Image (tube, grey):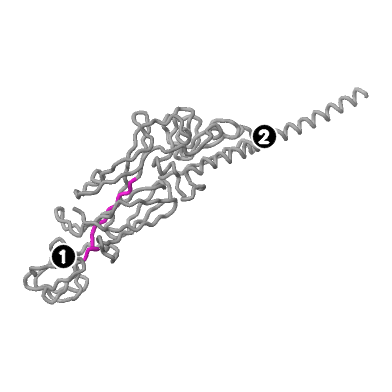
Amino acid sequence: MTLIEIIVVLGIIAAVTSVVLSSAIDFNDREAFERTQRTGQEIQKLFYANDSDDGISRFLSDMGRLPVAYGNDSNALAELYGEDIDPDIHMEILTVDINNHTSDGFDMPSFQMLCGWGGPYIYGNDSIDKDGWGNKWQILNNSGVTTDSWEEYATVYGVASAGSGGDDWSGEEQKFSFGNPAVSSLKVNVYVVERLSGASLVRPVIIDQNATERANNHPYVLDALIAVNDRIYKCVAAGTSASAIPVAWDKTYGATTVDGTVQWQCVAQYMNTLKALFFYPEVVVNASEKERVIESKSTSGSTTNILEFEKLFPGRRKLFVWGYYKIDDDNFINKFHSDVMDVTIRPGTNHVTVYLVNELK
């Protein structure tokens, strides 16, 4: 074989080798890319509960928040698989006094609720704490921007991989967001109805601001409302009231009282204020404290019997509703409250019906 032939053969071998190596590198990058996708989506499922039968994220339900990063440059997912979890935040039953969450001055009930870390929420931390290329996950902040390092106990809004670092498709950033309650579309519509204990009749609460003090010799039309003896009465037969207030007013809900030529019915469902509290666990972890608390989100209404909550994390929660007709700062009538309800809220719009079944004291 001549020298020229040898040079030609070596050139061919080098070219083939280059193609093989390039194909191998491309294959390895593709495999790493796909492995990153699988791992990132598996982590992401923990917060969207796509693989959960009841559609609830166990982590969000237990902790009431997104995970926080332990350490400045590692352990972004420590709370998911249970590394360095302080015993002070392990799951426990907490007693909640509703009086500590409202200033209305009524005697509210207490209840118990689970709160705390109940993981691990995912297994195999050796296989999930890095992306497909073996690099540490970057974390997403609340704006969806990635960072390689972070402050200790920073909230983790998601994880990201920078890829292989190359200039081709394998160097593209892959992001896996955990969601953000501040921009969440989750809503809860609470429909409030009145059903006194033992009663079979269920009536929607009617919000009305027009109840007046009864007047003598006054003409009343159908559906007029008056406030008498800690009750609201509705005109069910129009006429003119008596020249003096009747001595005996039937305070039984649904019963009628004759007043001159007017007939009044004692009604429970009329109120001018409704209030609700949504209770959820929140595990506080920062540089100065580690504790389990039960937080509440409140809402109120004075125009409709539908109360709305939004920007909540999904999970198993507690709901308490009460309402009344406020005459003045010292006088409240038609005062009722619900039982403390267990509710499960999911992503999207939730609808809950609440029954006012007990009188407020």
Give the answer, above or below, for where 43 lies relative to 202: above
Residue 192 horizontal/vertical position (percent): 31, 59
Q: In the rendered structure, which segment of residues is drawn in magenta?
A: 267-279
Q: Residue furthest front?
A: 198
Q: Secondary structure at mark 1?
A: loop
Question: In the rendered structure, which disc, 1 or 2, sits on the residue that comes first in sequence?
Answer: 2
Give the answer, above or below, for where 88 lies relative to 261: above
Residue 205 horizontal/vertical position (percent): 27, 62
Type of amino acid at the residue the image marks with label 2: Asn
Foreground residue, 150 or 268? 268
Foreground residue, 117 or 29? 117
The residue under label 2 is: 28
The residue under label 1 is: 251
Give the answer, above or below, for where 6 lies relative to 255: above
- Residue at 22% across / 46% down in the picture? 103
- Residue at 35% across / 38% down in the picture? 92
